[in-house]
Amino acid sequence: MKHSWGLMDLVTVATIGIASGVLFAGWNLVWGAASPLFAAVLPLQYLLFAGTWVIAGPLAGLIVRRPGAALAGEAIAASVSFLLASQWSVDAIFSGAAQGIGAELAFAAVGYRVAGWRVALAAGGLSGVGMALHDLPLYFPDVSASFAAALAAAMVVSSAIIGGLGALLLRAALRRSGALDLIGA
Amino acid sequence: MPSLSIEIADLTWRPAGSDRLTLDLRGTAINLPAGGLLLVSGTSGAGKSTLLRAIAGLLGTLLPGELQGRLVVGGVDLVAAAATESGMPRALSERLGYVAAGPAPTYALPLLVDDAALPLESRQIPTDEMRSRIERSARDAAVDAALIDRSLTTFSGGERAAAAALVALVASPDLLIADEPLGGLDARSAERLAATLRESGATRVIAAHDLSLIHSASAQHLRLDGGRIVATSAASAPAPDWGTMHSVAVGGVPIVQLVRATAAGRDVGPSSIAVMRGTTTLITGDTGSGKSTLLHLVAGTLPLELGERIAAPDLRIRLAPQDSGLLLGARPARALVTPTDAARAELLAQRLDVTHLLDVTPGRLSDGERRRLAMVVTLAAAPDLLIIDEPSGGLDDERVTALCELLSNRDVLGSSAVVIATHDPRLATLGRPDARPLRRVRHPEETGTSVEPTEGGLAALLPAPAARVAESAERLLSPELGRRLIGTANPLTRLGLALFWFALSIASPATPVAQAAIALPVLVVAWVSGVQILATLKLALALTPALAGIVLANVFGGASVEEAVGAGTRLLAFAAGSLVLLRPFEPLRMADAFIETLRAPFAPTMALLATAARIPTLRDEARERRAIRRLTRRGADPFLLADMFDSVIRTVPQLAIALEVRGVRLPTRERRPTRRRPSRFGRADLLIVGLSVGGLLVSVARAVAEAILGT
């Protein structure tokens, strides 16, 4: 069995990260445009939109089952979105890392052997936890506890469903088309 | 170093996820002595590329699947390596030059000079030797010296092929493996590159449909079919000449007409052409003369920069691009055919011998197979205008004949106008006497003039004294002056400062005050790096609603107005600074800096950066895919996102191969990395760091002064 990271794994993670990063950069604009509309019901905005930002971690982890893939995928995606266009600037890298560590923990917990819907859901959900731990103290330090809790819940649920299950669906589509055979995933 | 020998016996290959062998050489043995030449021919999908990849040590190592039998190249047992290694064995990688088959991009880095330097950097060859070696290989590979410093994304199919050969030759390989190296080249360039390949002292394995140019007396031949060897000698028919083609004058009302049209960002002169109903137009011309651009302009899939495009209303247009993947996407060809056209598609598929491929997802198919499917999909729609870019690429003589019959057939084409761009003299049979009217156009001579440089700019419009003032103002404002004065800052400095400012805006008790430390250097850096004002304004527009959102949300969430504004200001503080600071986005300079200064591991850094460097291509492709798709269907396409991920994943093996054959896993940590563009820290870095520190000190001094005066 080959254990080391080959170029195929490296390029796959980089590609997933970068394609997602381009997606995120566009999503940042959507988010920005939607922000004033949702200001009064911010948890709803997080519930509907936030999960897209964590999709790179679960997707990279589901496709390349190696230690570090999920973290690298999400961190790369976040960095790319920062370099292209992001109102969160350098902080995108840190929030990407926080979300990536969450996803990575889910894959590490099963020893990188299993990659079914439960792991996908957990990876997405834990990414949401990472998002909450990073975002709340930085952007919402002074809000009430109940508001913070609503935000955190929205982040976790959205990340689990859009990020986790979305990544699973995307992987299924890629498997059907035969793209994954080409890279040996 | 001496060239190496190749031993092949009973070799088989089964790719992952497939249940059939795509290469089956059981019962045959091939021995190629050092310095020998092995020519591989065969129909499209016969297994030529597979055999070449096996010999390059890519199968089972980098590309997933099962390799069995015996394959020893230069003393390295590649079957054993396939079971244990996740990349090409090092001993082989050092000595290999590999030309991958087009038309999909096969480069690792977008600028030709960077791409060609990569094999040299991998082998840690001194920086000052790089340029001369690249220029020598350019001559050998028939690459125009002017192209060396240009971006491969602007190259035509033929120029890309020559560039791929340049990169394969640059490190003077002992083993040279070339897959269709002459594809898309015009006759003159093809002859020059063929001479280089014939005369090289390396052991050579070359696959081609037309072997007449590369043939030499001592060469060994293999003819493959269905992954098996069918003959060990190849009789290649002499290619017909363009001169044998005749053209027929045609009339009628044009359905699409271009008048001195140019496309933004394409270095191609204005072109004029008229396309008539019921005729076929064959566009020929040299490699890089802009044939594909012309086709896209006719199709309306590229926006016009200058000139005019007049088209009949409600035209049904179909375009089969040079890279069929852009048309086919991730779904079987049948999904792209509307039900009413299904019977027609069935018939066409029969004629082109792809009936069995209609329901297969195109990922596994060879370039030739995909191209024939693209023909079925586009022809089935019976469009008013059918545009085909290099229809015969990757097809053998027999298939080209079948295709020509189809494209000459009055019944199949009806009143469709057909525009074809090609290099291939085999398409000459399109012009036979019983066929439809054919017009032959040479691009650019007969469709337009060469590129006319625009002179003067603003200054040309003004009277003399005012012009002088305007000129010096332009020079002062141009980033060139800034570059000359202080050079351009190292990307590491800019990244470091962005991180520092981020920390500062979080830590600082008076965030707006900290901005003093940021504003000044930002302005200078923006000026020096020639910041795009429009792009920055766009970002500011995106930032404003986000800012409003976060302030409002904090207020609704229970924070005081003051606290909410504080949260908003903080966002603004680190956003504004680093947004401007990181433009322009220079992934390659950043990679150089990381590898050289921070000694970042070579392979992962190059993998990441080579992928990042494809972002513009990725966006262009997405745009092209959308434009081509829009010809077929209106409205939103839910498959686009899955198609996008599918197509980027499909580029992974190509890019991994490109990096592998350029030897990015070779460098050792013991020796210093060599870079074509050494990463240096200069006055620019000192200046912006100094400005930032100075600004910070001023802020601190002000805060201290305020504290003292306040009490």
Image (tube, coloured by chain):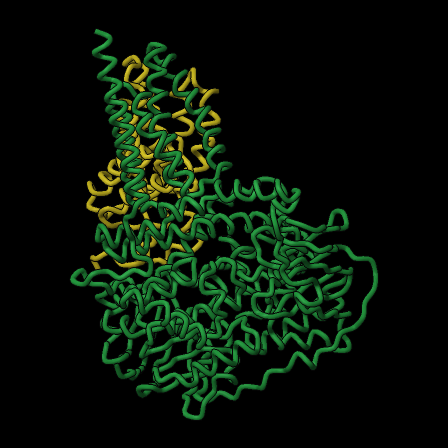
Palette colour of chain A: yellow
- The quarter in which the C terminus of chain B is drawn is top left
Give percent across and percent down for residue B633: 63, 46
- Which of A112 and B576 lies nearest the eye of the viewer? B576
Which residue appears farthest toward the bottom when viewing the image? B217
Give percent across and percent down for residue B456: 61, 50
Residue B7: tell me if it is visible: no
Compared with B15, B176 (above or below) is: below
Compared with B122, B266 (above or below) is: above
Residue B645: tell me if it is visible: yes
Q: Is residue B358 left or right of residue B110?
A: right
- The quarter in which the N terminus of chain B is drawn is bottom left
Palette colour of chain B: green
Picture quadrant of residue B253: bottom right
- Residue at image location 30% in from the left, 37% down from the top: A93
Picture quadrant of residue B459: top right
Compared with B617, B446 (above or below) is: below
Q: Is residue B527 left or right of residue A120?
A: right
- Which of B410 and B282 lies nearest the eye of the viewer? B282
- Which of B368 and B473 lies nearest the eye of the viewer? B473
